[in-house]
Each structure stands twice: as C-alpha cells, then as structure tokens.
Image (tube, grey):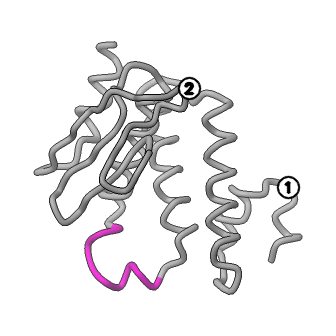
Amino acid sequence: MTKLRDIMTVHWPHGWVVYERTPINSKGQFKSVVGLVAGLTRPELKIIEVSDVVCRETLYVFLHECGHVNCGHFASDDEESLPLAQHEYEAETYAINAMRAGGLSVPRKTLKGAREYVRKCIEEEPDRIQTKEVLKFAYGSRWRQHC
C-alpha cells in the first residue's frame, strides 16, 4: 500500500484535489455527477475523483486521470481539436509509464481494457484522422487495416 501512495504522490497534479470514493460494484465504479464511473477529472474545479486506490488496477485509474491533467488536456480550447482517442491514448500511456517507472507492472486485464477503450474512442469519431501511435496502441499488429 505504501508503494501505491508513493507513486500517487509523484504524479498528483499540483493544486488539484483528489477524492477517493467507495466503489459500489465489481467494476470499481462509484456514483458521480455524470453517472457510474471508475475515474473522473473535473478541470473546472481542479478535482480528480477515483475509486479507493488499494491495488494496481485502481492506481492505474488514478494515474490515467492524472495523465489528462499532466498532459495538458484541459489547458486550452485548442486541445478540443484533437481526437478523443488521442487524449485517451495519452492518458493511458501516461498511466502505463508511471506504473512501470514506479516499479509496478500493469495487469494484463487493465492493458486489454485500455486498448479496448481507445478503440471505442476511435469508433466514436470515425471521420477523425488518428495518429499511427494511437492506431498501433488500439489495434496492435493490425493497425494498418484501420488507416
């Protein structure tokens, strides 16, 4: 548990408040202002909400939300011009790299979910052009089929 907290401290965005919520289901989700979620960033209030950080999976969600902040996704309106999949890819890779830098492996199930989530974001914006990095992350060796 101490290692999880140490990693959280390193990546906690300066000036932001983090609320850990008790999950209400097996997916680690909690009730928020937007419905059931595992993590939520509220830039207008500088708040990150996540399920209680008690394991690698919940740490990953915390780091993903920190990735949105630390990658500057809320810095200006210009970021709105980027595809949603790009934002999510950046947050996912931030979380992966942060865990590995902290000496923790990312659970396979979590990685699989991250790739599926980025694929879903690509599908939600079919007319948006995606970078090669986003496509490789989402589709692996089959990425060229989705150009």
Q: Which residue is mark 1?
A: 141
Quick one: label 2, few (<14), some, or many (20+) residues within 10 Å? few
Q: Secondary structure at mark 2?
A: loop
Residue nearest the viewer, comparing 9 with 125: 125
Q: Does the magenta portion include 76?
A: yes
Q: Which residues are magenta?
A: 73-81
Name the residue located 18 percent from the left edge and 66 percent from the top edge.
44
31 vs 72: above or below? above
Task: Give the numbered dot on residue 21.
Answer: none
Task: Give the numbered dot on residue 105.
Answer: 2
* Label pair 2/1, CB-CB below 8 angstroms: no
**Identity of the residue furthest to the top in this view:** 1
**Count of residue discs:** 2
Q: Tag 1: residue type?
A: Ser
The image shows residue 9 at horizontal and vertical percentages of 23, 32
The image shows residue 42 at horizontal and vertical percentages of 26, 58
Quick one: label 1, few (<14), some, or many (20+) residues within 10 Å? few
Rounded to the nearest angstrom, the CA distance separating label 2 from label 1 is 22 Å
Name the residue located 21 percent from the left edge and 40 percent from the top edge.
18
Name the residue located 61 percent from the left edge and 35 percent from the top edge.
110
Name the residue located 38 percent from the left edge and 37 percent from the top edge.
30
Q: Does the magenta portion include 4?
A: no
Residue nearest the viewer, comparing 101 with 9: 9
Quadrant where the image shows the C terminus = bottom right
The answer to which of marks 2 and 1 sits earlier in the sequence is 2
40 vs 73: above or below? above
9 left or right of 121 in image = left
55 vs 66: above or below? above
- The quarter holding residue 49 reads top left
Q: Tag 2: residue type?
A: Ser
